[in-house]
Amino acid sequence: MNKNFTRLLIGSGENSPEIRYLTGISTPDDFICFEHNGTVTALMSKLEISRARQTAKPGVAVLPENDYGTTRSEIIARAAEVLKAEFFEVPPSFPLGLAEKLRGTGIKLQVSEKEFCPGRSSKSPEEVGFITASQRAGEAGFSRAVELLGESSIANDGTILWNNAPLSSEILRAEIDCAILKNGSLPTGTICAGGIQSSQPHNSGSGILFAGTPIVMDIFPRSLESGYWGDLTRTVVKGKAPEIVKKAYIAVKAARDAVKENISIGADCAKLHKLAENILDRHRFHTGVSDGEPFGFFHGLGHGVGLEIHEAPRLSPRSTAKLHGGEVFTVEPGVYYREWGGIRLEDLIYLAPDGTVNCLTRAPDLLTIE
Amino acid sequence: MNKNFTRLLIGSGENSPEIRYLTGISTPDDFICFEHNGTVTALMSKLEISRARQTAKPGVAVLPENDYGTTRSEIIARAAEVLKAEFFEVPPSFPLGLAEKLRGTGIKLQVSEKEFCPGRSSKSPEEVGFITASQRAGEAGFSRAVELLGESSIANDGTILWNNAPLSSEILRAEIDCAILKNGSLPTGTICAGGIQSSQPHNSGSGILFAGTPIVMDIFPRSLESGYWGDLTRTVVKGKAPEIVKKAYIAVKAARDAVKENISIGADCAKLHKLAENILDRHRFHTGVSDGEPFGFFHGLGHGVGLEIHEAPRLSPRSTAKLHGGEVFTVEPGVYYREWGGIRLEDLIYLAPDGTVNCLTRAPDLLTIE
């Protein structure tokens, strides 16, 4: 490694996955961090320094930022001096405003052309453990939803009734999210979208839920302690499912399971997406655009999961990624039609460095809840 | 307004308060947004466009990004062409990597020197309503904590017992957070720090809770729907409070209430901090550093609350802000000592444009729960 190769980051432990990855420190506010000759240094405010020292990864130096200066540019200029750094390498997300101020004082910055933390896409056993723990919390949420829908009844007009009152997306979400909290993770916007709302993949869902239509539940909790996410989707129907919904469920499940069987080291992520699309087509669930609105399978097949809910690798038609082993990623085909709603099924996969495909999702596949 | 004055942003509705403020759209993934002659345009992916159209603020144009191009630089270059924009004004947080790519293709960018959305610090009645709703959810969480601590008993060794088992920070947090969820908001890392952990202002708290020592509860939920935060802190003791804790509580409450009485249009934020510090000093709760660790009142008095949990104005010793009217901000003095823990009391204030000081916090002040 070049002696004068120094990397500079600014961000919060909560919002910057690179900073969290390099330091292990979680903070709500931004802090400055640099890496010089392989040693990571975090500069912390008085408010955060005690906690940062306790939670930093082994080997990370945690120093008071006011030993370096008061403003961000002062602190970074002083760090450059101390380290005798000729330039700093920064990630593409580095803020332009600060970059211009620093360059104005003669500090050289170079945007990293490679991934800033290339190790992030290959998960260590510890990281797989963190992700699995968040996944289990999400599954506890799904179990609670199944239990609640099992306890509920159907009114004459099709409304789902629970505790003698109409069941809404809001109530179902709160019950799922409470189960997540009690299992040590943090819910972050659980989707409970019923009926026509389920035809929009990212609609959170609101209002009364009805029997006989799909309810998409996409549950993605984050561990407050580790910062790692889980991600899980199931689609269920209270009561009887219409024929089209049953067929769509079978098609989506077939697509998901075929992809899972084709995961291997060297697999091409765009081809995995195409495989799912072909299977959905063969089941006559086509993808396209009508009146400016997309229908069918119009999102990516999956994405990496770690310190970000959406990270590399992307499994999408335009992806150029291949699987190397070590990745944790979702496989989540879905189909969506304005006429009746949508179906999405999402499993979380860990492709071990030896090529073993481990499904980290234990939630059962079930379409109808009587 | 200059005809060729065009502003450009990139970010997610969840993480970029400027994008959320200008468009009203909430998304987990980044999108491109520009403002030209006062009209805001959001360019959305196929996945988000339907939902974005339903949730965008009135007057915001929501267009499919793939009409403009495939990559971010293509999309922005095409937008510049369509708008005949000579340059784009961007916020300081604009990503350096993308800025360099755009400049490489001849697009001119200028970092805004003023606040990008100056209207954000003066809240509209609708915004005050959103913040108040999140605050009420946080208060429901605090009420649950008071109820639970009232139901609990004290074991011979001082452990707090609830439901015949030791009460931990984790259990207390989950109960508070469930109440928040059931009141329509999202908990985001509620602090329940007991004993010595309470001496670190941002320690989330973990492990068994004991009677006779402070439990700091800092509750800051965010509404999933509106994106606005609430913020509330209370400190309680189960059973009897030691003399030092009682005295600290009286001092912190006196500091908070004196600041509240001195809020007015034109008030200097640094002076309000100093006022709190002086009152704490007068009560013999001094601030300083010992063995490299700070003690006393070593964080800012408060901060603005809105689409960010920490936003302008800052109420701190180094703040240059004055209050103009319209701001919503916290007043949260606290004292922290390694020897016995910490006390923090936080109210949320709305200073109306006519100078009226409205306390948005309704949670009671109480130190001990028998």
Image (cartoon, coloured by chain):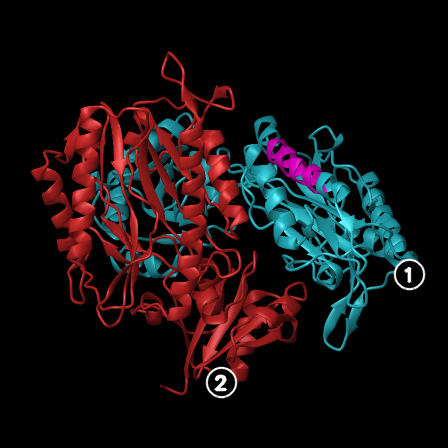
Chain colours: A red, B cyan
Q: Quadrant of residue A72?
A: bottom right
The answer to which of A200 and A92 lies nearer the viewer is: A200
Which chain is disc 1 placed on?
Answer: B
Q: Is mark 1 on a helix, strand or loop?
A: loop
Q: Residues within 10 Å of mark 2 (few under 14, many from 20)?
A: few
**Residue A99 coordinates in the image, percent (x, y):** 45, 64
Q: Which amino acid does label 1 sit on?
A: Arg
Residues at marks 1 and 2 on the same chain: no
Q: Does residue B139 show up magenta in the picture? A: yes
The residue that disc 2 covers is: A84
In this rendering, position of residue B43 left or right of residue B315: left
**Res. A179 visible in picture:** yes
The magenta segment is B131-145
**Residue A188 coordinates in the image, percent (x, y):** 46, 45
Q: In which quarter of the image is the C terminus of chain A?
A: top left
Q: Which secondary structure dominates the residues rendered in magenta?
A: helix
Q: Is mark 2 on a helix, strand or loop?
A: loop
Which residue is drawn at the image coordinates 19% and 33% (left, top)?
A: A248
In this rendering, position of residue A90 left or right of residue A357: right
The residue that disc 1 covers is: B284
Instruction: Tell me how far mark 1 sits from mark 2, CA to CA.
Output: 45 Å
Which residue is drawn at the image coordinates 75% and 60% (left, top)?
A: B195
Which residue is drawn at the image coordinates 20% and 47% (left, top)?
A: A256
**Residue A109 coordinates in the image, percent (x, y):** 40, 71
